[in-house]
Amino acid sequence: MPITLMPEEILETINMIRSENLDIRTITMGVSLRDCSHDDIATTAQKIYDKITRKAEKLVRIGEDISREYGIPIINKRISVTPISVVGESCTSGEYIILARALDQAAKEVGVNFIGGFSALVQKGFTKGDDYLLNSIAESLAVTERVCSSVNVATTKAGINMDAVYRMGKIIKDTAGLTKEHGGLGCAKLVVFCNVPEDNPFMAGAFHGFGEPELVINVGVSGPGVVLNAVKSNPNVDFGSLATIIKHTAFKITRMGELAGREAARRLNVQFGIVDLSLAPTPAVGDSVADILEAMGLERVGGHGTTAALALLNDAVKKGGAMASSYVGGLSGAFIPVSEDAGMIRGVEEGSLTLDKLEAMTCVCSVGLDMIAVPGDTTAETIAAIIADEAAIGMINKKTTAVRIIPVPGGKVGQRVELGGLLGTAPIMPVHPFSAEKFIRRGGRIPAPICALTN
Protein backbone atom coordinates (compact mmCIF):
# COMPACT_ATOMS: atom_id res chain seq x y z
CA MET A 1 0.00 0.00 0.00
CA PRO A 2 1.54 3.37 -1.02
CA ILE A 3 2.08 6.07 1.59
CA THR A 4 0.63 9.49 0.82
CA LEU A 5 2.44 12.48 2.30
CA MET A 6 0.92 15.95 2.65
CA PRO A 7 3.03 18.99 1.61
CA GLU A 8 3.33 20.18 5.22
CA GLU A 9 4.63 16.76 6.25
CA ILE A 10 7.30 16.94 3.54
CA LEU A 11 8.43 20.40 4.65
CA GLU A 12 8.50 19.28 8.28
CA THR A 13 10.60 16.25 7.36
CA ILE A 14 13.05 18.40 5.41
CA ASN A 15 13.57 20.53 8.51
CA MET A 16 14.09 17.41 10.64
CA ILE A 17 16.78 16.20 8.26
CA ARG A 18 18.56 19.56 7.97
CA SER A 19 18.45 20.66 11.60
CA GLU A 20 17.71 17.67 13.84
CA ASN A 21 19.88 14.75 12.64
CA LEU A 22 16.96 12.72 11.29
CA ASP A 23 18.10 9.79 9.16
CA ILE A 24 17.41 6.24 8.11
CA ARG A 25 19.98 4.45 10.23
CA THR A 26 19.96 1.27 8.17
CA ILE A 27 18.30 -0.51 5.27
CA THR A 28 18.97 -4.18 5.92
CA MET A 29 18.37 -6.93 3.38
CA GLY A 30 17.54 -10.29 4.91
CA VAL A 31 18.77 -13.22 2.82
CA SER A 32 17.82 -16.85 3.45
CA LEU A 33 20.80 -19.19 3.21
CA ARG A 34 18.89 -22.39 3.90
CA ASP A 35 19.57 -23.64 0.38
CA CYS A 36 23.33 -23.19 0.81
CA SER A 37 23.93 -26.19 3.06
CA HIS A 38 26.32 -28.90 1.86
CA ASP A 39 28.36 -31.58 3.58
CA ASP A 40 31.57 -30.00 2.27
CA ILE A 41 32.27 -26.75 4.13
CA ALA A 42 34.18 -25.16 1.23
CA THR A 43 31.20 -25.75 -1.03
CA THR A 44 28.87 -24.28 1.56
CA ALA A 45 31.10 -21.20 1.84
CA GLN A 46 31.13 -20.74 -1.93
CA LYS A 47 27.34 -21.08 -2.12
CA ILE A 48 26.97 -18.49 0.66
CA TYR A 49 29.25 -16.05 -1.13
CA ASP A 50 27.56 -16.59 -4.48
CA LYS A 51 24.03 -16.12 -3.17
CA ILE A 52 24.74 -12.99 -1.14
CA THR A 53 26.66 -11.28 -3.93
CA ARG A 54 23.94 -12.18 -6.42
CA LYS A 55 20.93 -11.16 -4.35
CA ALA A 56 22.41 -8.04 -2.73
CA GLU A 57 24.51 -6.69 -5.59
CA LYS A 58 22.21 -3.65 -6.08
CA LEU A 59 21.46 -2.94 -2.41
CA VAL A 60 24.03 -0.19 -1.82
CA ARG A 61 23.45 1.55 -5.14
CA ILE A 62 19.67 1.60 -4.72
CA GLY A 63 20.01 2.86 -1.15
CA GLU A 64 22.21 5.70 -2.36
CA ASP A 65 19.81 6.46 -5.21
CA ILE A 66 16.85 6.73 -2.83
CA SER A 67 18.86 8.88 -0.43
CA ARG A 68 19.80 11.26 -3.21
CA GLU A 69 16.37 11.41 -4.89
CA TYR A 70 14.33 11.81 -1.70
CA GLY A 71 16.87 13.87 0.24
CA ILE A 72 16.74 11.38 3.12
CA PRO A 73 20.13 10.35 4.58
CA ILE A 74 20.47 6.55 4.59
CA ILE A 75 23.51 5.99 6.77
CA ASN A 76 24.05 2.23 6.47
CA LYS A 77 23.20 -0.52 4.02
CA ARG A 78 23.51 -3.95 5.63
CA ILE A 79 22.71 -7.65 5.25
CA SER A 80 21.37 -10.25 7.65
CA VAL A 81 21.42 -13.98 6.94
CA THR A 82 20.03 -17.24 8.27
CA PRO A 83 21.87 -18.26 11.47
CA ILE A 84 25.11 -19.86 10.33
CA SER A 85 24.84 -22.52 13.05
CA VAL A 86 21.98 -23.97 11.01
CA VAL A 87 23.40 -23.34 7.53
CA GLY A 88 26.65 -25.09 8.40
CA GLU A 89 25.26 -27.98 10.40
CA SER A 90 25.37 -30.44 7.49
CA CYS A 91 29.10 -29.82 7.03
CA THR A 92 31.44 -32.59 8.09
CA SER A 93 33.95 -29.96 9.24
CA GLY A 94 33.38 -27.67 12.22
CA GLU A 95 35.74 -24.94 11.00
CA TYR A 96 33.05 -22.28 10.76
CA ILE A 97 35.71 -19.63 10.40
CA ILE A 98 35.63 -20.60 6.70
CA LEU A 99 31.97 -19.58 6.60
CA ALA A 100 32.73 -16.36 8.48
CA ARG A 101 35.34 -15.44 5.88
CA ALA A 102 32.83 -16.10 3.10
CA LEU A 103 30.35 -13.74 4.77
CA ASP A 104 33.04 -11.09 5.17
CA GLN A 105 34.17 -11.35 1.56
CA ALA A 106 30.57 -11.16 0.31
CA ALA A 107 29.90 -8.08 2.45
CA LYS A 108 32.99 -6.38 1.05
CA GLU A 109 32.04 -7.29 -2.51
CA VAL A 110 28.56 -5.74 -2.32
CA GLY A 111 29.77 -2.77 -0.23
CA VAL A 112 27.82 -3.13 3.02
CA ASN A 113 29.51 -2.16 6.28
CA PHE A 114 28.16 -5.06 8.39
CA ILE A 115 26.64 -8.48 7.82
CA GLY A 116 24.78 -10.17 10.66
CA GLY A 117 23.88 -13.80 11.21
CA PHE A 118 26.98 -15.56 12.52
CA SER A 119 24.48 -16.65 15.08
CA ALA A 120 22.95 -19.46 17.12
CA LEU A 121 19.78 -19.96 19.15
CA VAL A 122 20.66 -22.08 22.18
CA GLN A 123 18.06 -21.22 24.81
CA LYS A 124 17.35 -24.91 25.51
CA GLY A 125 20.59 -26.57 24.48
CA PHE A 126 23.20 -27.10 21.78
CA THR A 127 23.18 -28.97 18.49
CA LYS A 128 26.37 -29.95 16.70
CA GLY A 129 26.11 -26.82 14.56
CA ASP A 130 25.63 -24.61 17.61
CA ASP A 131 28.74 -26.05 19.22
CA TYR A 132 30.78 -25.48 16.10
CA LEU A 133 29.59 -21.89 15.80
CA LEU A 134 30.20 -20.97 19.43
CA ASN A 135 33.67 -22.48 19.23
CA SER A 136 34.39 -20.31 16.18
CA ILE A 137 33.06 -16.93 17.34
CA ALA A 138 36.16 -15.42 18.92
CA GLU A 139 38.55 -16.24 16.08
CA SER A 140 35.99 -15.40 13.40
CA LEU A 141 35.37 -11.92 14.81
CA ALA A 142 39.10 -11.38 15.10
CA VAL A 143 39.93 -12.21 11.47
CA THR A 144 36.92 -10.60 9.78
CA GLU A 145 36.05 -6.94 9.46
CA ARG A 146 32.30 -6.85 8.81
CA VAL A 147 30.86 -10.01 10.35
CA CYS A 148 28.57 -9.64 13.37
CA SER A 149 27.60 -12.42 15.75
CA SER A 150 24.69 -12.99 18.11
CA VAL A 151 23.63 -15.82 20.41
CA ASN A 152 20.21 -16.20 22.02
CA VAL A 153 20.62 -17.84 25.44
CA ALA A 154 17.13 -17.40 26.91
CA THR A 155 13.45 -16.96 26.17
CA THR A 156 10.36 -16.50 28.28
CA LYS A 157 9.09 -19.90 27.06
CA ALA A 158 12.33 -21.83 27.56
CA GLY A 159 14.04 -20.17 30.52
CA ILE A 160 17.77 -19.38 30.66
CA ASN A 161 20.41 -21.80 29.42
CA MET A 162 23.05 -21.13 32.05
CA ASP A 163 25.57 -23.40 30.33
CA ALA A 164 25.28 -21.13 27.29
CA VAL A 165 25.53 -18.04 29.49
CA TYR A 166 28.81 -19.29 30.98
CA ARG A 167 30.18 -20.19 27.55
CA MET A 168 29.36 -16.70 26.30
CA GLY A 169 31.23 -15.17 29.24
CA LYS A 170 34.31 -17.13 28.18
CA ILE A 171 33.80 -16.35 24.48
CA ILE A 172 33.59 -12.62 25.18
CA LYS A 173 36.85 -12.79 27.11
CA ASP A 174 38.50 -14.75 24.29
CA THR A 175 37.20 -12.30 21.68
CA ALA A 176 38.58 -9.36 23.63
CA GLY A 177 41.95 -11.05 23.90
CA LEU A 178 42.16 -11.82 20.19
CA THR A 179 41.30 -8.20 19.31
CA LYS A 180 43.32 -6.56 22.10
CA GLU A 181 45.29 -4.39 19.67
CA HIS A 182 42.01 -2.61 18.91
CA GLY A 183 40.74 -2.35 22.47
CA GLY A 184 38.70 -5.56 22.32
CA LEU A 185 36.81 -4.31 19.25
CA GLY A 186 35.59 -7.80 18.37
CA CYS A 187 33.24 -7.70 21.36
CA ALA A 188 31.44 -4.72 19.81
CA LYS A 189 30.31 -7.11 17.07
CA LEU A 190 28.94 -9.73 19.50
CA VAL A 191 25.55 -9.62 21.25
CA VAL A 192 24.00 -12.06 23.74
CA PHE A 193 20.18 -12.05 23.68
CA CYS A 194 17.09 -13.09 25.53
CA ASN A 195 13.92 -13.26 23.39
CA VAL A 196 15.78 -12.29 20.23
CA PRO A 197 13.58 -10.92 17.40
CA GLU A 198 13.88 -12.52 13.96
CA ASP A 199 13.53 -9.27 11.97
CA ASN A 200 15.89 -6.85 13.69
CA PRO A 201 17.68 -4.64 11.12
CA PHE A 202 20.22 -3.21 13.61
CA MET A 203 23.71 -4.58 14.15
CA ALA A 204 25.28 -6.37 15.77
CA GLY A 205 22.22 -8.48 16.58
CA ALA A 206 20.57 -8.84 13.18
CA PHE A 207 19.91 -12.25 11.61
CA HIS A 208 17.36 -13.56 9.11
CA GLY A 209 14.82 -15.54 11.13
CA PHE A 210 13.24 -18.87 10.31
CA GLY A 211 9.81 -17.33 9.75
CA GLU A 212 11.11 -14.77 7.27
CA PRO A 213 10.71 -14.89 3.46
CA GLU A 214 13.47 -15.72 0.99
CA LEU A 215 14.46 -12.05 0.72
CA VAL A 216 13.20 -9.05 2.69
CA ILE A 217 13.98 -5.40 3.38
CA ASN A 218 13.80 -4.25 6.99
CA VAL A 219 14.40 -0.61 7.88
CA GLY A 220 15.80 0.94 11.05
CA VAL A 221 14.91 4.59 11.50
CA SER A 222 16.33 6.89 14.11
CA GLY A 223 15.49 10.34 15.36
CA PRO A 224 16.82 11.22 18.82
CA GLY A 225 17.55 14.75 17.63
CA VAL A 226 13.99 15.22 16.38
CA VAL A 227 12.48 13.99 19.65
CA LEU A 228 14.95 16.12 21.62
CA ASN A 229 13.85 19.22 19.75
CA ALA A 230 10.19 18.39 20.39
CA VAL A 231 10.82 17.99 24.12
CA LYS A 232 12.93 21.15 24.35
CA SER A 233 10.22 23.11 22.56
CA ASN A 234 7.72 22.16 25.27
CA PRO A 235 9.53 22.73 28.58
CA ASN A 236 6.48 23.29 30.76
CA VAL A 237 3.82 20.81 29.61
CA ASP A 238 2.67 17.98 31.88
CA PHE A 239 3.69 14.38 31.22
CA GLY A 240 0.48 13.40 29.46
CA SER A 241 0.89 16.23 27.00
CA LEU A 242 4.59 15.46 26.59
CA ALA A 243 3.82 11.83 25.77
CA THR A 244 1.39 12.98 23.08
CA ILE A 245 4.03 15.27 21.57
CA ILE A 246 6.55 12.42 21.44
CA LYS A 247 3.94 10.11 19.89
CA HIS A 248 3.23 12.61 17.13
CA THR A 249 6.95 12.96 16.47
CA ALA A 250 7.50 9.19 16.35
CA PHE A 251 4.57 8.94 13.94
CA LYS A 252 6.29 11.27 11.46
CA ILE A 253 9.65 9.52 11.79
CA THR A 254 8.10 6.11 11.19
CA ARG A 255 6.19 7.28 8.11
CA MET A 256 9.42 8.48 6.56
CA GLY A 257 11.14 5.18 7.34
CA GLU A 258 8.40 3.06 5.84
CA LEU A 259 8.32 5.22 2.71
CA ALA A 260 12.05 4.69 2.14
CA GLY A 261 11.88 0.99 3.00
CA ARG A 262 9.01 0.27 0.66
CA GLU A 263 10.70 2.12 -2.16
CA ALA A 264 13.90 0.13 -1.62
CA ALA A 265 11.93 -3.13 -1.60
CA ARG A 266 10.12 -2.16 -4.80
CA ARG A 267 13.32 -1.31 -6.65
CA LEU A 268 15.04 -4.47 -5.44
CA ASN A 269 11.95 -6.55 -6.24
CA VAL A 270 11.85 -8.11 -2.78
CA GLN A 271 9.29 -8.16 0.01
CA PHE A 272 9.05 -5.26 2.47
CA GLY A 273 9.30 -6.46 6.05
CA ILE A 274 9.20 -4.06 8.98
CA VAL A 275 10.17 -0.65 10.27
CA ASP A 276 12.20 -0.72 13.47
CA LEU A 277 11.52 2.68 15.02
CA SER A 278 14.21 2.53 17.68
CA LEU A 279 15.78 5.80 18.78
CA ALA A 280 19.39 4.89 18.03
CA PRO A 281 21.86 7.55 19.19
CA THR A 282 25.24 8.40 17.71
CA PRO A 283 28.26 10.19 19.19
CA ALA A 284 27.20 13.34 17.29
CA VAL A 285 26.11 16.32 19.39
CA GLY A 286 22.32 16.56 19.49
CA ASP A 287 21.78 12.88 18.65
CA SER A 288 21.52 11.53 22.19
CA VAL A 289 18.80 9.66 24.08
CA ALA A 290 20.38 10.85 27.34
CA ASP A 291 19.86 14.46 26.22
CA ILE A 292 16.14 13.74 25.71
CA LEU A 293 15.83 12.46 29.28
CA GLU A 294 17.67 15.49 30.62
CA ALA A 295 15.45 17.80 28.55
CA MET A 296 12.49 16.35 30.46
CA GLY A 297 13.91 17.95 33.59
CA LEU A 298 16.64 15.65 34.92
CA GLU A 299 19.88 17.35 35.90
CA ARG A 300 21.86 14.36 34.67
CA VAL A 301 20.96 10.99 33.14
CA GLY A 302 21.22 8.24 35.74
CA GLY A 303 19.83 10.39 38.55
CA HIS A 304 16.59 9.57 40.32
CA GLY A 305 13.70 9.79 37.87
CA THR A 306 15.71 8.48 34.91
CA THR A 307 13.90 5.14 34.71
CA ALA A 308 10.48 6.83 34.77
CA ALA A 309 11.53 9.29 32.07
CA LEU A 310 12.86 6.48 29.89
CA ALA A 311 9.65 4.47 30.38
CA LEU A 312 7.58 7.42 29.14
CA LEU A 313 9.87 7.94 26.14
CA ASN A 314 9.95 4.29 25.13
CA ASP A 315 6.20 3.83 25.40
CA ALA A 316 5.37 7.02 23.51
CA VAL A 317 7.76 6.10 20.69
CA LYS A 318 6.13 2.67 20.34
CA LYS A 319 2.60 4.09 20.35
CA GLY A 320 3.42 6.72 17.76
CA GLY A 321 5.15 4.21 15.52
CA ALA A 322 2.33 1.69 15.80
CA MET A 323 -0.14 4.34 14.64
CA ALA A 324 2.06 5.22 11.66
CA SER A 325 2.66 1.70 10.36
CA SER A 326 1.08 -1.73 10.56
CA TYR A 327 4.51 -3.25 10.06
CA VAL A 328 6.51 -2.18 13.10
CA GLY A 329 8.96 -4.83 14.27
CA GLY A 330 12.53 -5.51 15.25
CA LEU A 331 13.44 -3.96 18.58
CA SER A 332 11.54 -0.64 18.36
CA GLY A 333 12.02 1.66 21.33
CA ALA A 334 14.92 3.62 22.78
CA PHE A 335 18.50 2.34 22.70
CA ILE A 336 20.89 3.26 25.50
CA PRO A 337 24.33 2.25 24.16
CA VAL A 338 26.90 4.00 26.33
CA SER A 339 29.72 4.42 23.82
CA GLU A 340 27.38 5.66 21.07
CA ASP A 341 25.63 8.36 23.11
CA ALA A 342 27.49 11.50 24.14
CA GLY A 343 25.07 12.14 27.00
CA MET A 344 25.48 8.62 28.39
CA ILE A 345 29.27 8.98 28.27
CA ARG A 346 28.97 12.27 30.17
CA GLY A 347 26.77 10.60 32.79
CA VAL A 348 29.27 7.79 33.33
CA GLU A 349 32.23 10.15 33.62
CA GLU A 350 30.40 12.45 36.04
CA GLY A 351 29.32 9.52 38.22
CA SER A 352 25.54 9.72 37.73
CA LEU A 353 25.29 6.60 35.56
CA THR A 354 26.43 3.22 36.84
CA LEU A 355 26.13 -0.34 35.62
CA ASP A 356 23.40 -0.99 38.19
CA LYS A 357 21.38 2.02 37.01
CA LEU A 358 21.77 0.99 33.39
CA GLU A 359 20.45 -2.45 34.31
CA ALA A 360 17.40 -0.87 35.94
CA MET A 361 16.82 1.27 32.85
CA THR A 362 16.85 -1.80 30.62
CA CYS A 363 13.65 -2.97 32.32
CA VAL A 364 11.73 -0.24 30.47
CA CYS A 365 13.69 0.42 27.26
CA SER A 366 14.33 -1.32 23.99
CA VAL A 367 17.24 -3.67 24.51
CA GLY A 368 19.75 -3.90 27.33
CA LEU A 369 23.30 -3.30 28.47
CA ASP A 370 24.72 -2.07 25.20
CA MET A 371 28.30 -1.07 24.34
CA ILE A 372 29.48 -1.24 27.94
CA ALA A 373 33.25 -1.22 28.51
CA VAL A 374 34.55 -2.87 31.68
CA PRO A 375 38.07 -3.48 33.02
CA GLY A 376 40.14 -6.03 31.17
CA ASP A 377 40.60 -8.19 34.28
CA THR A 378 36.84 -8.73 34.65
CA THR A 379 36.39 -12.49 34.86
CA ALA A 380 34.35 -14.64 32.49
CA GLU A 381 32.15 -15.58 35.45
CA THR A 382 31.36 -11.93 36.22
CA ILE A 383 30.52 -11.27 32.58
CA ALA A 384 28.31 -14.37 32.56
CA ALA A 385 26.55 -13.15 35.71
CA ILE A 386 25.87 -9.78 34.05
CA ILE A 387 24.40 -11.65 31.07
CA ALA A 388 22.28 -13.81 33.39
CA ASP A 389 20.86 -10.77 35.18
CA GLU A 390 19.91 -9.15 31.90
CA ALA A 391 18.42 -12.38 30.55
CA ALA A 392 16.32 -12.69 33.70
CA ILE A 393 14.87 -9.22 33.12
CA GLY A 394 13.91 -10.19 29.59
CA MET A 395 12.57 -13.61 30.51
CA ILE A 396 10.32 -12.44 33.34
CA ASN A 397 9.08 -9.33 31.56
CA LYS A 398 8.53 -11.07 28.19
CA LYS A 399 10.73 -8.58 26.37
CA THR A 400 13.95 -8.57 24.39
CA THR A 401 17.07 -7.87 26.41
CA ALA A 402 20.70 -8.12 25.37
CA VAL A 403 24.28 -7.60 26.49
CA ARG A 404 27.08 -6.15 24.36
CA ILE A 405 30.00 -5.80 26.74
CA ILE A 406 33.69 -5.15 26.11
CA PRO A 407 36.29 -6.24 28.69
CA VAL A 408 39.02 -3.91 27.44
CA PRO A 409 42.39 -5.70 27.55
CA GLY A 410 44.62 -3.81 30.00
CA GLY A 411 41.86 -1.25 30.56
CA LYS A 412 41.23 0.30 33.96
CA VAL A 413 38.22 2.12 35.42
CA GLY A 414 38.22 5.77 34.39
CA GLN A 415 40.05 5.21 31.12
CA ARG A 416 38.41 5.37 27.68
CA VAL A 417 38.56 3.01 24.74
CA GLU A 418 38.24 4.42 21.22
CA LEU A 419 36.16 2.13 19.02
CA GLY A 420 35.74 4.42 16.02
CA GLY A 421 32.87 5.50 13.78
CA LEU A 422 29.34 4.95 15.02
CA LEU A 423 30.73 2.70 17.78
CA GLY A 424 32.10 5.80 19.51
CA THR A 425 34.15 6.04 22.68
CA ALA A 426 33.47 3.93 25.76
CA PRO A 427 34.42 4.99 29.28
CA ILE A 428 35.50 1.93 31.27
CA MET A 429 32.96 1.30 34.03
CA PRO A 430 33.49 -0.52 37.34
CA VAL A 431 31.89 -3.88 38.04
CA HIS A 432 31.10 -5.31 41.47
CA PRO A 433 34.18 -6.89 43.08
CA PHE A 434 32.18 -9.77 44.60
CA SER A 435 32.48 -13.14 42.90
CA ALA A 436 29.60 -14.93 41.16
CA GLU A 437 31.78 -17.90 40.20
CA LYS A 438 30.01 -20.53 42.32
CA PHE A 439 26.64 -19.31 41.07
CA ILE A 440 27.63 -19.44 37.40
CA ARG A 441 29.34 -22.83 37.69
CA ARG A 442 26.08 -24.52 38.77
CA GLY A 443 25.10 -24.74 35.10
CA GLY A 444 21.88 -26.26 33.86
CA ARG A 445 18.82 -24.25 32.95
CA ILE A 446 16.89 -21.69 34.97
CA PRO A 447 13.29 -22.79 34.34
CA ALA A 448 10.82 -20.68 32.43
CA PRO A 449 8.63 -18.47 34.63
CA ILE A 450 4.96 -19.12 35.33
CA CYS A 451 4.04 -16.30 32.96
CA ALA A 452 5.28 -18.54 30.13
CA LEU A 453 2.24 -20.82 30.55
CA THR A 454 -0.04 -18.87 28.25
CA ASN A 455 -1.48 -21.65 26.03
Image: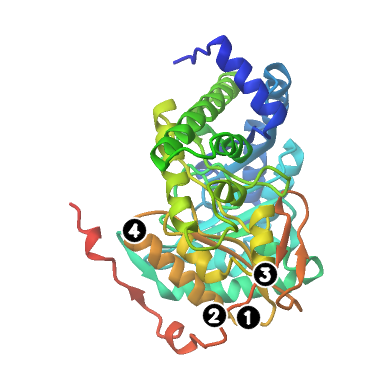
Disc nearer the start of the sequence (1/4): 1
Q: Position of residue 386 (x, y in %)?
A: 50, 73
Say which residue label 2 marks: 382
Identify the amino acid type marked 4: Asn
Say which residue label 1 marks: 378
Q: Are marks 1 and 3 in contact (CB under 8 Å)?
A: no
Crowding at dot 4, Cα within 10 Å, few <14 / some 14-19 / many 20+, comes out as some
Task: Please state if 254 lies on the left or on the right of 268 as rendered.
Answer: left
Task: Please state if 215 lies on the left or on the right of 343 as rendered.
Answer: left
The residue lying toward the viewer, choosing from 22 and 270, is 22
Residue at 49 percent of width and 70 percent of height: 387
Disc nearer the start of the sequence (1/3): 3
Viewer-side label of 4, 2: 4
Say which residue label 4 marks: 397
Q: Quadrant of residue 173?
A: bottom right
Q: Position of residue 51 (x, y in %)?
A: 62, 37
The residue lying toward the viewer, choosing from 89 and 20, is 20
Task: Please state if 279 lies on the left or on the right of 199 as rendered.
Answer: right
Residue at 58 percent of width and 34 percent of height: 233
Q: CA distance from mark 2 to mark 3?
A: 16 Å
Disc nearer the start of the sequence (4/2): 2
Crowding at dot 1, Cα within 10 Å, few <14 / some 14-19 / many 20+, comes out as some
